[in-house]
Image (cartoon, grey):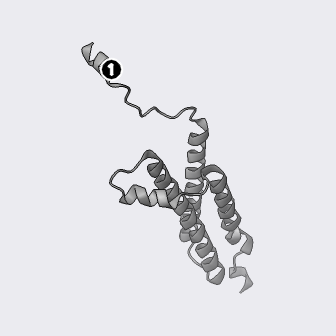
Amino acid sequence: MSGSRRPVLPLLAPLPIGLVQLLLARVVLGVPDWAAARDFLLSDRPTQADGLAAAQAVLWLVVGVALLAALTAAGRALATDGRRGREVGWSVGVVLAGLVILAAGAGHHVQTSSPSLAGGSLQEARAELAR
């Protein structure tokens, strides 16, 4: 009977990985501004800051769902001999969430300047149209 039980350590591996992802999300993304994210969804005139807050909130939700999925999968695997495919699916989800966080952090740190959204003056626009 003991030959059918799986080792516990591989089942618990997603837990520290998920916690590291939460820590990295905190460092890279910062704490989301939920009010600005809500304004992005509900406002008639959302701002760029509202859009960034909404994207940040979505990333946090992905990280949270991935961690909950890892916890759920580990709990189920410890309680029963669940299917191997389900564990692989959750592992892939956790890895993808980590890659999204890393990509967002890399994009944030690589970007040297923010684009100018100013349209210029009326005189500059007339000069461009006159060309």
Residue type, mark 1 in image = Gln
Q: What residue is at 69 percent from the left and 76 percent from the top? A: 6
Residue 43, quarter of the rendered image: bottom left
Which quarter shows the N terminus?
A: bottom right
Residue 26, quarter of the rendered image: bottom right
Q: Is residue 131 left or right of residue 54?
A: left
Q: Is residue 131 above or below residue 10?
A: above
Q: Nearest the camera: 60 or 33?
A: 33
Q: What residue is at 58 percent from the left and 71 percent from the top? A: 68
Q: Position of residue 48 (x, y in %)?
A: 44, 45
Q: Is residue 120 left or right of residue 111?
A: left
Q: Is residue 29 above or below residue 9?
A: above
Which quarter shows the C terminus?
A: top left
Q: What residue is at 41 percent from the left and 47 percent from the top? A: 47
Q: Position of residue 10 (x, y in %)?
A: 70, 68
Q: Is residue 95 left or right of residue 121?
A: right
Q: Residues within 10 Å of mark 1 (few under 14, many from 20)?
A: few
Q: Which residue is mark 1?
A: 123
Q: Nearest the camera: 128 or 6?
A: 128
Q: Nearest the camera: 35 or 113?
A: 35
Q: Position of residue 45 (x, y in %)?
A: 35, 50
Residue 4, quarter of the rendered image: bottom right
Q: What residue is at 72 percent from the left and 80 percent from the top? A: 3
Q: Position of residue 98 (x, y in %)?
A: 60, 54
